[in-house]
Amino acid sequence: MTYGEALEDFAIMALLGCSSVHVGGGETLLDPDGLCLVLDAARDAGVEIRYVETGCSWYRDKDSSRTLLERLSSHGLHTLLISMSPFHNEHIPFNKVKGVIEACHESGVSLFPWIADFYLDLDTFDDSVTHSLDEYRRQFGETYVENLPRRYGIVPGGRALETFDGIMEESSIEELTEAKRETGCIELSDTSHFHIDLYGNYIPGMCAGLSIAKEDLGHPLDPDEYPVITRLADGGTGALLSWVMEKYSFRPQRRSYTVDCMLCYEMRRFLVVEKGFDSSKELQPANHYLVP
C-alpha cells in the first residue's frame, strides 16, 4: 500500500468509529519501507496501531533484526505479534521465531506471541528446520491435529478447509443450510474483528474472497451490486445455493460438508472460475479464486 492509500483507509475506519487496528499480511516485514509508510499514515490519521503481525521468515541474524525493529519503533511500532503454532512451523523454522523474540527484548519492542501455549510443543523438535503436521501427530498422538481448533482461533476458510476436511464430523447440505435460513450468516455483520486488504476491500466476517468496496461501507448494500453477500446475509448459504443453482446451473460436488463455509466457497469459486462471474466488488481479489 502507498502512504496515500493507507491514509484513506485509516480515515474511513476512524470515521466509522474504529480507533485502533493491527497490521498483518502476508509478511509485513518483507517490505520495511512500506510498513513505515503505513505506520506513518496511521499516526497522521489518529488511528492507533495496537500491533504488527509477523511470521519471522525475514530473520537473518540478531544485529540486523534489532536494527530493523529499532527503525520501525521510531515510526510507531511498539508491539509485535509473533506467529507461533504447528501450522506456522510447517513453513518457518522455530529458531527464526526465537531470534525475533530475542531481537524484541533487545530493541524494547513488546511481544504478543500467538499462541504462547504452543511454545513447548514446537520446542520439542529440531528448531533449525520445518516440521509437518504429520510429525506432530507422530510425536503427540493421532488426535493432535483434530484437537488444534480447541487451542487455536481457526477461521473456517482458506487452508483450514482442507486441513480439517475428513477429520471433523460432516453434516448434510440440508442440515447446514437450514441452520442459517432464518438468521442468515450473522458473521458477515460482526465488526468486532475485521480486515481491510491492500486493495481497499473490506472483508466481511473475515471470509477470504468476499469483499465490500470501502466506499460502500457505512450504509446498506445494493443487492444488484452485491448479490452474493446480500443473499448470504439474508438467508445464509441456502439462499445463495438456491440462486446459484437456478441462475447458473450449479450442482454441489458433495452431499455433506464439515461446515457450510466449504459449500459457500465452492459456489463462489464456481462463479468466478467456471462462469466468469463479473463481480468487481464482492468476490475480490479475483486471483484469490484462480490460484489452484
Image (spheres, rainbow, N blue to C red):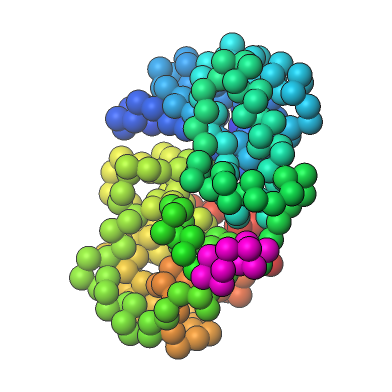
**Is 126 one of the magenta-colored residues?**
no
Which stretch is magenta? Answer: 135-144
Q: Is residue 67 visible?
A: yes
Q: Where is residue 156 in the image (x, y as percent from the top left)?
A: 46, 62
Side (left or right) of 230 relative to 254: left
Relative to 181, is 223 on the left or the right? right
Q: Quadrant of residue 224?
A: bottom left
Q: Is residue 175 left or right of residue 103?
A: left
Instruction: Name the residue at 61% across, 23% down.
Output: 104
Q: Residue 201 location in percent, x, y? A: 49, 44
Q: Position of residue 287 (x, y in %)?
A: 64, 57
| Whether residue 183 is situated above or below residue 101 in the rendered picture | below
Q: In this view, does 213 lie above or below 18?
A: below
On-image quarter of the N terminus = top right
The structure residue drawn at horizontal position 78% and vertical position 27%, both measured from the top left corner, is: 61
Query: Looking at this rendering, what residue extends furthest in the top direction?
Result: 74
Q: Nearer the viewer, residue 3 or 99?
A: 99
Q: Is residue 172 above or below residue 104?
A: below
The residue located at (64%, 20%) in the rendering is 69
Residue 272 vertical placement versus 248 (above, below): above
From the viewer's side, name the closer residue of 198 and 20. Answer: 20
> Which residue of the protein is positioned furthest toward the bottom in this rendering?
255
Of the pair 238 and 56, the residue shown nearer to us: 56
The structure residue drawn at horizontal position 58% and vertical position 63%, both measured from the top left corner, is 140
The spot of residue 292 in percent (x, y) is 69, 67
Magenta stretch, main secondary structure class: helix
Q: How many labels does the image show?
A: 0
Examine the rendering and report whether any part of residue 264 can be seen: no
